[in-house]
Image: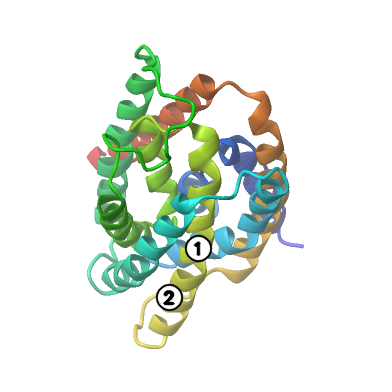
Amino acid sequence: MDWTVWGGLAAGLVIATVTAPVGVSGAVFLLPVQLSVFGVPNPAVTPTNLLYNVVAGPGALWRYRHDGALRGDLARRLVLGTLPGVVVGATVRVFALPGPGVFRLLAAALLLPLGLWLFLRALAPARHRPSGASELAPGRLAPHTLTGLALAVGVVGGIYGIGGGSLLGPILVGRGLPVARVAPAALAATFATSLVGAGAYALLSFLSSGDVAPDWWLGLACGTGGLLGGYLGARLQPRLPDRALRLLLGALATAVGALYAAQTLN
């Protein structure tokens, strides 16, 4: 068996174990591995990431559902907003942003400020939040604002190949919502939009002469590792303090954003 299959399995396992507790599928951090280590061409790296999300997602989601964490209105609103956005993002990715230079610049512009914001918010003194407060409480994000934000993030997620939920998770956690509530909803949105996004890229591959179709073997290998790692990460989450999870998410996003910024400057 080709070494990339075993390498993809290991990469998906490690990344998902670390990222699933904070509501991130791991695709956002798998992207530089696919580009730099496995040499997946652009824009095929994006649907390969979406394929990873589709295969890896059920592991963490099953565990969160088993623990009773996957409930409430938040997941539904994220899914309804990101689903149409990811189709638009996939179209933009194929026909308007095929070059790796623009792709890395976009990734750096998204991840670096988002990661720094979340990291600094985690270091700031915690504000009191009543135990019975709604997950869509006033002063955070109104329902229509949340749906609009999910739509915009879905477009970006379709371009970036992360399903959308991986961006919404850090944003909502940065707004003050607990990671334990955001993580299952963000992963549910990522899984749903990745299914739609992968299908959109499969159709667009017939309309484009570039490398649009996913790397099926690598995507399946990474996804299988992510399936196992996501389950392990979701099982670990209740044992980790919320502040540590916020710091971890912010640090990972900042590190990857800085890496892309350096590659763009070079």
- Could you say where residue 45 lies in the image, as x and y percent from the top left? 45, 62
Residue at 37% over, 39% down: 172
Q: Which mark is residue 201?
A: 2
* Image-based side of 88 in relation to 42, left or right: left
SS of the residue at dot 1? helix
Q: Amino acid at mark 1?
A: Leu
Residue 43 falls in which quadrant of the image? bottom left
- Verify CB contact (< 8 Å) between mark 1 and mark 2: yes
CA–CA distance in space, label 1 to label 2: 9 Å
Residue 251 falls in which quadrant of the image? top left
SS of the residue at dot 2? helix
Q: Is residue 33 visible?
A: yes
Residue ID for mark 1: 50
Residue at 71% over, 47% down: 63
* Image-based side of 124 in relation to 3, left or right: left
Quadrant that contains the C terminus: top left
Q: Residues within 10 Å of mark 1 (few under 14, many from 20)?
A: many
Residue 255 falls in which quadrant of the image? top left
Residue at 54% over, 60% down: 191
- Could you say where residue 225 lies in the image, as x and y percent from the top left? 69, 51
* Image-based side of 54 in relation to 78, left or right: right
Using the image as rendered, state which of residue 6 and residue 165 is in the foreground. Answer: 165
Q: Is residue 161 visible?
A: no
